Amino acid sequence: MRPRRPGPAALVLLAVLVWLIAYPLALVLVEGVRDASGWTLEYVRLFLARPSEWEALWGSLWISVVSVVLAGAIGIPLAFLFSRYDLPAGRLLSGLVALPAVLPPLVGVVAFLFLYGETGFVSLLVQRIFGLTDPPWRLQGAGAILLVHAYSMYVYFYLFVRAALLSLDGSLLEAAASLGAGRWRTLGRVVLPQLRPALAGAALLTFMTALASFSAPYIFGGGFRVMPTQIVATRLNGDDRLAMVETISLTLVALTALWLFRGTRTEAAAGGRKGAGPARVPVRHRGARLALAALGWLLAAVLLLPHATLLLVSFVPIGTWTVEPLPPAYTWRNYLTLVQDPVRARPLVNSLWLATIATVAAVSLALAGAIVSRRRRPGARVIEALLAMPWAVPGTVFAIALATAFSVRAPWAGRMILVGTVWILPLAYLVRNLPITSRAILSGVRALDPSLDEAAATLGAGRVRTLRRVTLPLLRPALLAGASLAFVTAFGDFVTSIMLYTYDTRPISLEILSSLRQSDVGVAAAYGVVLMLVSALVFAVGAERRRPE
Amino acid sequence: MTGFLRLEGLTKQFGGTRAVDQVSLALERGEMLALLGPSGSGKTTTLRLLAGFETPDAGRVLIEGDDVTRVAPVSRRFGMVFQHYALFPHLDVARNVAFGLESLGVRGEELSRRVDRALALVDLAGFGPRRIDQLSGGQQQRVALARALAPEPRVLLLDEPLSNLDPTLRERTRREIRELIRRVGITTVLVTHEQDEAFELGDRVAVMRAGRLEQVGTPDELYAAPANAFVGGFVGQSSTLGVTILGPSARGLRISIEGVEWDIDLPPGAAGLSGAAMMLVRPEALRLAPPDPAALPATIVGRRFVGPSAIYSARTESGAVLEVVAPAQAVPAGARVGLLPSRRAGGGIHLFPADQR
């Protein structure tokens, strides 16, 4: 029997996590109610008294709720369509439908701008067709934000519900049929109750993502206020302590959501199934087959339009495309610039090394946490909770917390000046990535049969050898999955970068923004394409080993 | 052809293979039929064709003369117990049992009365409010039975009903199921790969191989007169050995085994055979003797006890292993013995054409 106290490794890990995660958040909490003259509720009072704060909080809340509804309305039917019916080219389509996931938030927003903005392809097309003098709509305000959210977040519902449907025990449906239950009764009484965990998980994930969403409101918000953009604006105004209070208010909303959905699992995998999955229903009627196929491809086309647009725009030379529906000229120059011009190439290199460092660090910490938690050592639960904590807190909040904690030189208080150095961004990415990375790795570690360790021990393998020869090889899929999630998120990050970057460490997302401001749409799109392709590639590598056995 | 439930030339292909090939069967009302066969023999597909989960490529399913081949499972009113029970995990025991009754529009007082009756039938009275995951495997199995029986289906289908129970429970449950189905009097088709299960539960047993029906009969018929070496080998204990038929003899038939001649009773259906043949022999049809030129020389290589007797494995010079039943302490392992056909008449030795398996 091992001693029931935390080992030295666990203690070190605990200290690191507290220092990186809990401490900065605690500092925000304190700074919101304390200034040079001591403890004060002045800023809370100020916050409560300002209508614009309430407006932003309410905006965040209802946008998030409606985003959940819209994402569900798109994702759930799609999941049913592709997992229950055997459609022509169904496998290909069901993969294509998940592709919005490879667009980092800012890139998705930019693609929407090119498509549906005032001079976007679709807007101009509609304007021409109907002979309008003005653009048919303005891509601004709550509607625009919801459009982007629905597009980028239905994937959660789609993937969760599809996984749950595919892992549903097929004999449950047959049992219902043999007991005389028709299609709708089976759906309502058997299928939906089985889908509840998946639906709750997707809803929670969508809500949290929408609540933290920054890119869409930042670009399309106009006068519409949501809390993440409000926090950044307040901070730019120099009202640091008010920004802290705003940060706390947003965190409270997030925590309330987590509490309401407590007990919900947010992993797409639904284990513990017996028997085979339900057979797909073949669509026999020719007309129905054709109609469904056409619908499927049309849908895929609409969903892939942003990707295609980015690709097209990335070939547009600067200053050549103004009012024509399609760009008049094309060039490779934008891509050449990214490689040849040192100023343009810098963000690419930056994003690569920043994301790599953050990924390696996140995987190491998550793996250490998972191993400690597997040994069921005391402190394991605290470590797990710390690893998951950044998830409950929107990215803006963490950016503020890190900016607060590491802008002061006070070594005895565990604080140093990192803001303005190259180290703050990898640190911020690392902290933001810990929850998803550790979740992937933790579930891999939990799935390991403990008797494998025992078998290795009876064969004379020490702890290190067991880790190297047994545990790590078996964890490869989980490690790859965790690493790919971490890398993609860090590589495309915008929300924490915009608050913490320096000119020397400017990542791709900020360069996209500045290219847009200089109306250099071609280069902005070329960066977007690079982000999209790298994300897709990394996802493919991460998913490769997760293929079902 | 008459019968309460009839299968006529049922055929089902998956890809290029015929999972079920021209299967025809007839069951009387209240009869219990066991479909027996190794995995991949098509027995489960046959059951699913009966339930309506698969549509046959050819053939018909008739119940009381009605063709239900194309009737959806929803309206077929065939009850089914699934291999893994397929109990709805989010509903309690009573709601599981009520599920089929509600499909029939049974409500209120009547519903709870019939749920209680179904639960009492499987000895689970009072288990209604339990959650499914609070039940043992045996209890889950009985809930599945109660759920299938509650709407009073026309036919009961059981897919490997005992395969998920541990061996000690299996035998008891087998008796309980048999008694329950007798009491209810429902026409039942059961799929199993266990010969004991098929023989104890089935009034008749249908042996399947590679999608085809090899033989249908009562357990006694199958044991006494297997249609071929496959049925003989699948039903009961036996060993097989190549022999040569020499001709009629005083006792019945003279055969040569590895150069030794035996005089045996004329096996059923062997009258037309001559030359090389395949012999299938039950342990009780042989006896052990001291080594002797007239007996087949063999060495005892193993022994397992069955009550006061033991079944000995004896290896002949060609390497074939035959099983022989004899008193428990007859000979030690390693002993050299002679094998002879039992003196007692009563079969146990079957001959089939050599090219058949």
Image: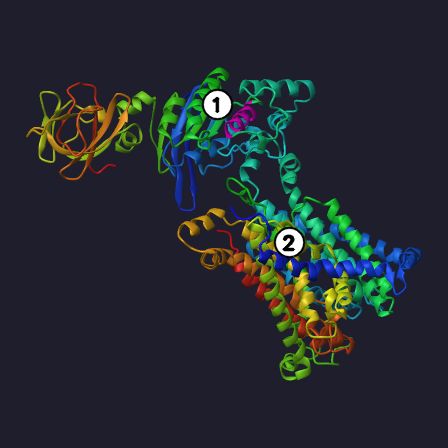
Residue situated furthest left in the rendering? B293
**Which of A53 and A100 lies nearest the eye of the viewer?**
A53
Q: Residue at x 68, y 22 (%)?
A: B107
In the rendered image, the vertical position of residue A262 relative to residue B86, given as above or below: below
Residue A229 is inside the magenta segment: no
Q: Residue at x 50, y 17 (%)?
A: B184
Quadrant housing residue A144: bottom right
Subunit bearing disc 1:
B
Q: Nearer the viewer, mark 2 or mark 1?
A: 2
**Which of A469 and B62 lies nearest the eye of the viewer?**
A469
Q: Residue at x 68, y 62 (%)?
A: A431
For the residues labelled 2 and 1, the Cα–Cα distance comes to: 69 Å
Chief SS of the magenta region:
helix
Q: Taking the image as drawn, is residue A48 in sight?
A: yes
Residue placed under numbered mark 1 in the picture = B65
Range drawn in magenta: B137-149
Question: Of the residues shown, which amino acid type is indicated by label 2?
Answer: Ile
Label 1 residue SS? loop
- Give the label on residue A383, or none: 2
In the rendered image, the vertical position of residue A290 relative to residue A183, given as above or below: below
Quadrant housing residue A323: bottom right
Label 2 residue SS? helix
Q: Describe residue A177's horizontal placement relative to residue B228 as left or right.
A: right
Q: Describe residue B107's horizontal placement relative to residue A225 as left or right.
A: left
* Mark 1, other Cα within 10 Å: few <14 / some 14–19 / many ≥20: few
**Which of B24 and B216 lies nearest the eye of the viewer?**
B216
Q: Do badges 2 and 1 share one subunit? A: no
Q: Taking the image as drawn, is residue A247 in sight?
A: no
Residue B141 is inside the magenta segment: yes
Residue situated furthest top in the rendering? B183
Q: Position of residue A420 (x, y in %)?
A: 74, 74
Question: Of the residues shown, which amino acid type is indicated by label 1?
Answer: Gly
